[in-house]
Image (cartoon, rainbow, N blue to C red):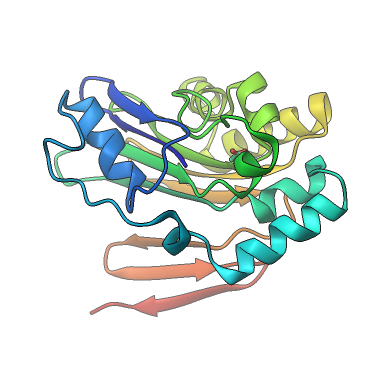
Amino acid sequence: MDASIMDGRDLSAGAVSAVRCIANPTKLARLVMEKKFAADMGIPEIPVEKLITERSKKHLEKEKLEKGAHKADCPKNSGTVGAVALDCKGNLAYATSTGGIVNKMVGRVGDSPCIGAGGYADNNVGAVSTTGHGESILKVNLARLALFHVEQGKTVDAAAELALNYMKSKLKGLGGLILVSKTGDWVAKWTSATMPWAAVKNGKLQAGIDLCDTKTMDLH
Ligand code: GLY
């Protein structure tokens, strides 16, 4: 598994890559950020079998049969989970982790533990977490690229679209991202087939998977 985390107050960050048997890799990344070690802090370990679902086993077998993941298939198989947050004090943060089905298959470290690619957070701009084809995300620095467009005055929607379309046109890389700006504007956008997402703002929950299929719920 790979994971990274970033605190937008001071740009402090932590990341882990190719770790095994860790129940919550983002917690480990957070401990790295805070300069503490996993074992000392009692991070629970679990047998590796418990982290591999039947569904991911089937995916792995299917991918092996197809002789490796090609770009279009990566997003739905990457097992990436991400979050961004803006708190009432104006602090921003992101965290991204990857379960590793693609990593396991090709023996690689992906974008999720790389600051600027798997995510970025800066209180002066916003926070982003990304998912999708890791090799492309690394090359275009997808999270930082999206925030660059916000810095240049683009709306969060336009910034996400510009960054994702750049990756698609330069590298044929597909993916998605969630972005929240320092003013609380947010977007969930993707060029891959689907991307399950959810957002909460002012007591209103919105969630979706496919384009044009957003559900809204009042939490009060
Ligand atoms: N975006 C997850 C990975 O490619 O590793």
Query: Can you tell me which quadrant of the image ligand 1 is in?
Result: top right
At 38% across and 30% down in the image, what residue appears? 16
| Image coords of residue 203 (percent x, y) | 27, 69
Picture quadrant of residue 11? top left
Picture quadrant of residue 115? top left
Q: Is residue 180 above or below residue 44?
A: above
Residue nearer the viewer, 196 or 42: 42
Residue nearer the viewer, 156 or 69: 69
At 56% across and 63% down in the image, what residue appears? 196
Quarter in which the C terminus is drawn: bottom left
Residue at the right extreme of this rendering: 66
Q: Is residue 209 left or right of residue 152?
A: right
Number of marks present in the image shown: 0
Res 37 visible: yes
Res 121 visible: no
Q: Is residue 176 left or right of residue 186?
A: right
| Image coords of residue 9 (percent x, y) | 21, 25
| Image coords of residue 194 (percent x, y) | 68, 60
At 70% across and 66% down in the image, what residue appears? 58
At 64% across and 33% down in the image, what residue appears? 107
| Image coords of residue 186 (percent x, y) | 44, 48
